[in-house]
Amino acid sequence: MPRFLYSTRYVRLASGATLVVALLNLSGCGDTKYSLQANIHSLDGSGLTLSVNGATKSVPAGTTTQMLASALASGAQYSVAIVTQPSNETCSVANGSGTIGNANVTNVQVTCVADSYSVIGSIKGLTTDGLVLLDNGTDRMPVSANATHFTMPTPVLDGDTYAVTIQSQPTGLTCSVSGGTGTMGTGGVMVAVTCVPDTYPVNGTITGLASTGLVLQDNGGDTTAIGANATQFMMPTVIAYGSPYSVTILSQPVGLDCSIADGAGTMGAGGATVAVSCAANAYMVSGTITGLTTGGLVLLDNGTGATTIPANASHFTMSTSVGYGSAYAITVQSQPAGLVCSVANGAGTMGAADVTNVAITCEKNTSVLYFFQGGSDGEQPLGDLLQGADGSFYGTTNVGGANGDGTVFKVTAAGSESVVYTFSGTDGQNPNGALIADSSGDLYGTTVYGGDYAFGTVFEIAANGGESVLHSFSKGGDGGYPICTLVEDASGDFYGTTWGGGYSHGIVFEITSGGAEQVLYSFSSGSSDGGYPTSGLVLGSDGNYYGTTSQGGSANAGTIYKITPGGTETDLYAFTGGNDGGGAGGSLIQGSDGDFYGLTSTGGANGDGTVFKVTPSGTESVLYSFSGVTADGDDPTGNLLLASDGNLYGTTRLGGASNYGTVFKVTPTGVETVMYSFAGGATDGANPSAGLIQGSDDNLYGTTSAGGPSGYGSVFEVRLH
């Protein structure tokens, strides 16, 4: 039933009398008040204070339901928040704000959880891997070598117990824990782990000791005398793990000459074994050589005694002798240009005469897997190969195929070629860069032309051979003419460059696997950023992308740049076109030293291109300058390869013995070797424009853009061993 409220108003009349007027007030309808309360969960500590519409309210420990307000009108706003946290707990508010309706508010939730703290500690003396710590028997923490601190993965609730123990000891060390158990208090705890090296003996074997007088010493002081005909020995003093040992001969036995193998090293787990060989004399290792038509062959015996063999040699003798009873092992340190040499009968134990039966056979190191015919199989491969999970090699031809617009091809290790896809224009035209593959075996790449606007595409080829265009470039703001290889990030997105578009000087773009393209940066080809990138990107270890431009920069000779995933571009270095190189081509690679390596097609000391190195901070240095025709190569345009042997490998489009290009090797110190010079005829190929890849067999594989019986290029292999 509605309530009627009355109010009285006094009105003074002119005569001085007062008229009392009773007014009916109807505004009192619907003024019912409502309450606001909170449900409190797990409040074990004191000190919780809530703010209720700006007013504070303390909540005692153990409270489960708290009235916050009891007379709020419908339509009123309410806001509940934490002002102070209780001791040793952290509380949060859910449903803490809203508008009063026509009922009491009971869904405000305050939930408290006990604070937890990390178990951390210091580590001393951990020089090896293998240490595994446990907390409370389950929380497992592997600790790497040389670590000085650790934090257990799982925090411990305040008031709960912790117990840090060692599950696994590191290699060669014994570690102990102090302060490892207790009850967790506010701020966490500090545990100390101390590791000390284990000790092991230095022992060894002896062969040929037919007389007395042999005295061995370790590290220049620990000595032991060995009796005649002994076959084993142990040095008196044990050595700590990780410490050096060096066993030498202090005195030779009567009438014999003894030598030591594996006598020095760093002590490992289980001890060290040294071999002492005694012989009356020392002998030479020699043998025959066939097929050595060029210079550059260097042989080693037991990893030392480098012996250089001249071209056309048919015999060799190692430069150092081998003692009786000792091992010899002849290996190839450096292969001759254009050849690969193998060793037979190269290892054994020296007898009482010279070894003369080592046989070295040298063969041509390059073979052609496939010659393109220029028909439906395609012609003019320009990009790097990709080795698939099936062991076959995948690549693209720039032209040819059924429609003349290029192909995606597969060549098996045995040299059988098949066309995976033939481009027809709207789906892309003239692929130039290499392919990349995702974890499912799908292939991704770019075409320079074709697509909806004829300015290139990013395409995907499924494992079943079906092709789809992820993006068609318009040569506008989204770029045009993508000529380089894509790079995929951890999330499955792709990054690349276009030669044109943007501000007309090329762009850096990102494209999702679903085809959504984003321009990260447009080059202006000015002195500040460069232009016309002819190389793809490399994802650096710092998470940024690095690349080169062929033009622009302060001397208009190209730049080296860095770009973040968000699109912030920084020029690291501007080429001058002089001794430092110019017109960078091919993608950069990052070495294990963190520096980047690449090629310039021009410049250098002789104007024929360079192999350069640049630090992440932008300091550039030239490892090697090419000197042109008949010498070492000219115009390197492909990508560099950092092979498993630690050397850099690549191709030059011109130069070499016949001026049809080369395969070259450059050591980290800048020593260059021509691995192969292309003849340009029907036997091998000509003008390699792509870089090399290292196959699963450790050999190198690449393409030539021309040459072969039909003149349309080849897929070739270069053997390293």
Image (tube, rainbow, N blue to C red):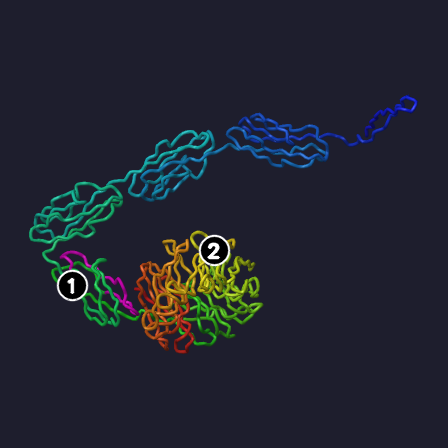
Front-most of residues 77 and 64: 77
Looking at the rendering, the stretch of residues picked out in magenta corresponds to: 321-343
Which label sits on residue 326? none
Q: Provide the secondary structure element on which disc 1 rests.
A: strand
Q: Is residue 1 visible?
A: no
The residue identified by callout 2 is 570
**Residue at numbered disc 1:** 355
| Count of numbered circles in the view | 2
Crowd around label 2: few <14 · some 14–19 · many ≥20 (10 Å):
some
> Residue drawn 58% across and 67% down?
452
Q: Position of residue 513 (x, y in %)?
A: 53, 58
| Circles 1 and 2: CB atoms closer than 8 Å | no
Q: Please, what is the three-letter code of the amino acid marked with disc 2?
A: Thr
Whether residue 651 appears in magenta in the rendering, the answer is no
Lower position in the chain sequence, tag 1 or tag 2: 1
Which residue is at a point 50% across and 30% down the rendered structure image? 88
Left/right placement of residue 554 relative to residue 700 reads: right
Q: Is 75 positioned to the left or the right of 321 in the image?
A: right
**Residue 254 appearing in the image:** yes
Pointer 1: residues within 10 angstroms few (<14), some, or many (20+)?
many
Which residue type does callout 1 highlight?
A: Val
Residue in front for this viewpoint, 279 or 554: 554
